[in-house]
Amino acid sequence: MSNELNRFLGGTVVGTIVRLLVVSLIVGFILSALGIHPLDLWDGVIDFFAGLWQRGFAALGEIGHYFVLGAIIVIPVFIIIRILSYRR
């Protein structure tokens, strides 16, 4: 059972928790530097779907903005995870 859990997590439970803490700290720093707060992200998602419903599918053009915003977070996290896994 622990081998399956370790394989699912990509390592030991403690190692995974440490990696998640480090990545969370980095993402939090990046979001803070950009002036983005969790409620801003949540409100943005809610506003997107409300706008989609109200204006129809023309709001899909906003997806490009969300891709860029997400890439600002995801790309550095991906690179950091790859660097951390390369060291093993």
Image (tube, rainbow, N blue to C red):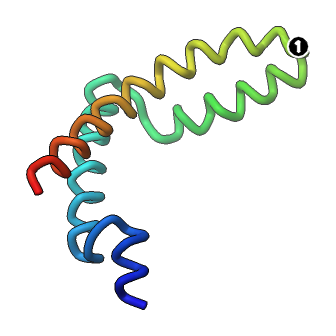
Q: In screen coordinates, is 43 left or right of 33?
A: right
Residue 33 is situated, as x and y percent measured from the top left of the image, at: 26, 26
- Reply above or below: 76 against 4: above
Quadrant location, the C terminus? bottom left
- Reply above or below: 53 against 88: above
Residue 32 is situated, as x and y percent measured from the top left of the image, at: 30, 32
Identified at 25% across, 46% down, the residue is: 81
- Reply above or below: 22 against 66: below
**Residue annotated with mark 1:** 55
Identified at 21% across, 64% down, the residue is: 18
Residue 57 is situated, as x and y percent measured from the top left of the image, at: 86, 15
Q: In screen coordinates, is 32 left or right of 74?
A: left
> Which class describes the residues within 10 Å of circle 1: few (<14), some (14-19), or many (20+)?
few
Q: Nearer the viewer, residue 57 or 3?
A: 3
Q: Nearer the viewer, residue 14 or 53?
A: 14
Q: Nearer the viewer, residue 62 or 39?
A: 62
Query: Looking at the rendering, which quadrant does residue 71 occupy?
Result: top left
Quadrant location, the N terminus? bottom left
Q: Amino acid at mark 1?
A: Arg
Identified at 19% across, 51% down, the residue is: 85
Query: Looking at the rendering, which quadrant does residue 45 occupy?
Result: top right
Q: In screen coordinates, is 59 left or right of 43?
A: right
Residue 80 is situated, as x and y percent measured from the top left of the image, at: 21, 40
Secondary structure at badge 1 equals helix
Residue, far bottom:
1
Query: Looking at the rendering, which quadrant does residue 72 occupy?
Result: top left
